Amino acid sequence: MDYAKLGLKVGLEVHQELATEHKLFCKCPPLLFRDEPEYTFIRRLRPSQSELGEIDPAALFEFLKGKTIVYEANRETSCLVEMDEEPPGPLNPEALDICLTFTLLTGGAPVDEVHVMRKIVVDGSNTTGFQRTCVTSLGGQLEIGDKTYSLQQVGLEEDAARKIAEEGGVSRYRIDRLGIPLIEVTTDPVIYSPEEAEEVALAIGQILRATGKVRRGLGTIRQDVNISIVGGALIEIKGVQELNLVSKVVEYEVQRQVKLIELVELLKERGVKATDIKDEPLDVSDLFAKTKSRIVKNALGRGGRVLAVKLGGFAGCVGMELCPDRRLGTEMADHAKFAGGVRGIFHTDELPAYDITVEEVEALRKRVGASDADAVVIVADEEESCRKALSAVVKRAKEALEGVPSETRAANPDGTTHFTRPRPGAARMYPETDVPPIVVSSERIAGLRANLPEMPEVKLERFTADYGINEKLARQVINSDYTQLYEEMMGEGLADPVQLAVTLTEDFRGLQRDGVEIGSISDALIRDTFGLLKAGKTAKESLPQIFTWLAENSGGSPADALDALGLGMIGVDELRRMVEAKVTENREMVERMGDRAMGPLMGMMMGEVRGRAEAKDVQALLREAIGALTRE
Amino acid sequence: MSEERLHGYRGKLREALEAAGVGIGDLLRIDSGDGSFEGSLMPRVETADDWHIVLKMKSGYNVGIAFDEGAKVVRLGQAEKPEFRPPPLPEVKQGLPRVSIVSTGGTIASRVDYITGGVHAAMSSKDLLSIVPELSDIAAVDANILYSTFSENIDAEQWTGIARRVAEKVKEGSQGVVITHGTDTLGYSSAALSFALRNLPIPVIFVGSQRSSDRPSSDAATNLLGVVSTAAHAPFAEVVLGMHETTSDTSIIFHWGTKARKLHTSTRYAFQSVNAEPLARYVDGKVEMVAERYRKRGEGELELMDSFESKVALIKFHPGFQPSTVDWYVDDGYKGIILEGTGLGHVSTGLYDALRRAVKAGVVLGMAPQCVWGRIDMDVYSTGRELQEIGVEPLGDMLAETAFVKLRWALANSDDTEGALDLMRRNIAGEYSDRTLYTGRFG
C-alpha cells in the first residue's frame, strides 16, 4: 500500500485513566468492584438540544431505540454525584496537575482558564446523559527519532460507566468506573502510516507513564484512531485497547476505504443509480415455507416473516471483501442489526448456503425480479424488525454509490472494525454550568515545572547504570506500568533487580496472556510477596502461582496464598528427612550410579518440593545424603 | 444593544472587543504573548473575572484565554449566533381531555442559558411541549406562562395569582390543571393553593424537576408525562404535588399539597409525604390511588379564598434564641407567628414573657415540630403545658411550613383572632392526620 499516494492521514486520541486519590468530580475512590451490586436503579435518557439549538443526530438515534437503562452501584465507589442526584463537586486539582505536567513535558500551552463542557452521550454510559470534559492545553509535540508529531490538545474528562449486559430493550451499566479521571491526548492528523501510528501511541503511553500517576490494568488505556484517505471519509475508530493492534487497525481501515472507493467506480460502470434501489421490501415468506434453514424456519415458526429487497446492479458487490473476513454484506448486516434488532441478513452473493437451497434462491430472484446482475437481501424476523433492517440495508447500498459513509466504528479483536453509531457533531457540547471555570495561574505552572518527572530516555540510562540490568530489560520495565513500583522497591532493597524486573514484565505479561487479571494486584501485595521471598518464606518458583491466586482472591494476602496453595517453605529438618527418604527409596540407583544419581534425584525432589525449597538447599542435602550412602 | 453583544465582558477587554467590532458568536482571532487562538466568542459569566475571553473552538470546546494589554483581537467573520430553536409543536389531537399547564418557572421550565452561564428560567410551557411531544398523545394541552421566576422569589402575591389563574381554567372547562414550579418553595405553594381553592372539581397538580430539562437525564419529561396524564384521568379533585417517587424513572408519586416537604437538596425524590401516606401513584402509564378517602372529581363548585396575610413569621427556635426577636415581630405589627419548637413542641422558658406579650397584643401563636416527623403534644412536659397556658396553639402533626402558610391564609380569611384560631384548628385540606403510622427510616 502506498500510503502517501492514498493521502492517508491518521490522528490519535489516547485516553488514559489517572491514578488520583479521588474521582474527577467527587470524593469517591477511583476503584472498580466485582461483587454483586448493593443497589440498582432504572433510568431513560432523552435527547436534548445543544447551545447552538440543534439536536444531535447520535443522541436522537439512541433515544429512538427506546432503551431503558439499569444502573448498578455500591456505596464504596459511588455517591449521589455518579447517580446524577447531586451536582458535581469542583474539578479534581490533582487530575488537572497531571494533565498540566504532561503538557509541560510535551511543550504545549496550557489554557489560561479551563472550561468544563457537557458532551452529550445518551447510550446510557453516563447517568446524566452527558460526559463532563474539558481542554487543558493546546499544542505541544512528540519527538520520535528524527520526526516530530504535533499535538492538537490535551484534555481531562470523566470515564464512563461500564456496560455489563444488554438484553432486549434494557442495557445494564455499572457506575463504579463513572467519574474516574481520564487524560485525553489528541494528536493532529500528522501520522501517515500504520507503523507511525503505533510508534506515536507507544510514545504517548511512555510519557503518560513517566508522570507516575496512571492507573494500570486492562482497559485503563484506550486509543481512538481517526483515519482518512483522499476520496474516502474521516472515520473515527473507538476503543482500541491494545497497543499492538493500532497499526493493524489503520492498515485494515485503509483497505476497507480503498475497496469502498473502488466499489463506487464499479457500480458507476454498471450504471447503477440511487433511484434504482428502492426501499420496497417484498414478503417472500411463502417461498421458504418448507425451508431447511434453521434460522428462517425458527423465525417463521415464531410468527415472523421473511422480507426481501432487491439491490439492482449489486451482484458480486455485496460479497466483495473490504478487509480480511469482512464484506459489504457484513457492513449491511451491522446496520440491519442496529436498526431492526435482527440477528443477521442473508444475501445472494453468499447463497446457496446455510441450508438455503439453489431452488429457493432462484424462486427468490424470480419473485423480486432480480436478474443475474442484481443482488437480493433477505431477513427473517418479526415483520416490523425486518422492515427496519432492510431500510438500513437499502440506505447502506445507496451510500455505497457515494463512497465511504462517515461513521463511528469500533475495533474488533483482530484489528478490523464494525459500525457502532452515527458520528456526533461538535454541536453536542455546551458549558457545564455547575462547575465554575478554573483559572490556571502562572504560580501553579511554575510549581509543576519545577517538579517535572523524568522523561523515559533519561530513566533508561539511569536504570541500566543504577540497577545493573541490561538495556532490553530496563526498557521493558520503563514501558510497563510498574516503573515507579520498581524504583521504590529497589530503593528499599526489597528484591534482586533482575528477578524483580523479569517478574514485573515478562512473567506478568505471560500471566496476563493466560487470563490472569494482573492489573488487579496492588503495589502493596507485590511488595508483600517479594517480602516473603526475601524472608525466605517461599522460593522464587512459586511467584507465578502466588500472583495468580492473589488476582483470583481479592482481599487475600500473599501469606494467605502460601497457606492456600501449600507453598510455605519446608523446614530444613523436614527437607532433610524427605531427601533421606528419597535417597533410601532409590538406594539401588544410588549404589549403581554414585554421584551421577544427583541429576535424576534432583528431578524427583524438585518435582515434589518446587516453590517450597530452594534448589540449592535440596542439592546440598542430596549431596550429603548420597555421600552418606556411598560411604556405607 | 452592545449590552447583549458582549454580555459579561467588562473593562479593558470589553473595549478591545468593541474596537475590533466583535460580538457574541463572531469568529475572531486573538494574538497574545502565549500564541494565537481562533474561535467564536462566547459570553462571559458576570461573576467571573474581567480579563479572560471565552472562545468556542472548532472542536466545540470552550477555553478561556487571558487578555493582556498587548493582545490583538481581529474579527474573522460572523459565526452562527447561539439560539434556541424549539422543534415544531406536535399536532393537537381531537377528543383528548383538556389539561392546562400553568408555568410559574423553575428548573422544569428552564434551560442552560449560554448568556449568564447558568440555569435560567427561559422556556415557555410551549417549548416544553415540543420537547416532550408525547404529551400531545395524552391530553389536549393548553400551556401558558404566568410567572417566570425561581421559586425562592415566590410570595403570597404569586399564590393569589396562581389561585386566580386556576379558577379561570376551571371556568374555561379544563379537566385538570398542572402548575410547573421551582422545587425550592413548591411545598409552600402547594399548601397555599390547598387552602385557597375550596370545593375543587378537578385535580390541580404541582410539578417541578430537580435536573435541568436541557440534559438527557432530566426528570422533567417523566414528571410532566406523569402529572399531565394524571391531571387528565385521575378520579381525585385535590391539590397535590407530583414528583419522582425514587431515584428511578419508574413512578411518579402524588403527595397531598399540605403534607409534602422538600427533604433533600438535590435528589429526584426530594419530596416526601410527611406524617401522611401519599394520595396516589402513576406507574406503567396508569394512576393508582393509594388513599381511600379523597374529594372526588366533579363534586362541586370552586370557591376562591385566595387572600394571604403578609405579616406572619416562621421562627425556628434554637438554643440561645432571644426574646427580643419575638418582641421585634410584635412591635413590627406581625399578626401571627409559627414557632418551630423542639421535640414535642417546646421553646425555652426564657421566651415565656415575650410570648405572653405577643398573645396580649393579639398575635396568633402556633407550635409546629422542628423534628419534621411526629406530632406536637404539649401535654406531656411542663414546658408544653405552660406554653399552652400562655396561649400557644398546638398544631398536631402539621408541617411547620404548611402551618406558616395556613396561618397567613387563616388570618386573611377571618375577622379576628378567635376566627383565625378556629380555622387553624379545623382540618381544612388534609393538613392534619388522625393517626401517625409507622414508616421506618425516612432519609
Image (cartoon, rainbow, N blue to C red):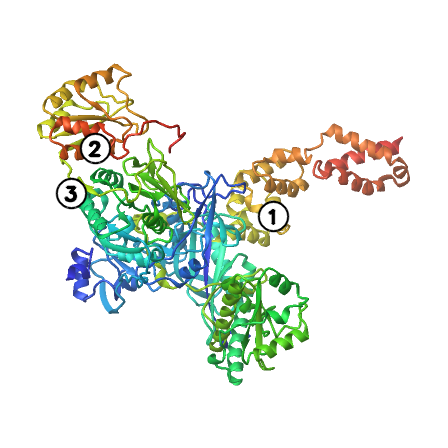
Helix, strand or loop under label 2: helix
Quarter assignment of residue B290: top left
Does residue A537 show up?
Answer: no
State the residue position of label 1: A508
The residue mark sitting in front, 2 or 1, is: 2
What is the chain identity of the residue bearing mark 2? B
Q: Which residue is mark 2?
A: B404
Return the residue at label 3.
B157
Q: Amino acid at mark 3?
A: Glu
Callout 1 environment at 10 Å: few (<14), some (14 to 19), or many (20+)?
A: many
Residue B91 image position (x, y, % from top left): 32, 63
Q: Quadrant of residue B316?
A: top left
Labels 2 and 1 in the same subunit? no
The answer to whether residue A364 is above or below residue A212 is below
Residue B348: x and y in percent read 22, 19
* Nearest to N terminus: mark 2 or mark 3: 3
Disc 3 crowd rating (10 Å Cα; few below 14, some 14-19, many 20+) is few
Query: In the image, is B338 to the left or to the right of B285?
Result: left
Q: Are marks 2 and 1 in contact (CB under 8 Å)?
A: no
Quarter holding the N terminus of chain A is bottom right
Name the one closer to the observer, A35 or B97: B97
The answer, for residue B290, to whether it is visible in the render is: yes
Q: Nearer the viewer, mark 3 or mark 1?
A: 3
From the viewer's perspective, is A84 left or right of B99?
A: right
Residue A23 in percent (x, y) is at 41, 45
- Is label 3 in contact with label 1 (beta carbons under 8 Å)? no
CA gap, disc 2 to disc 1? 68 Å
- Residue A548 is marked as none
Please, what is the three-letter code of the amino acid marked with disc 2? Answer: Phe
Q: Tell me the element at label 3.
A: helix
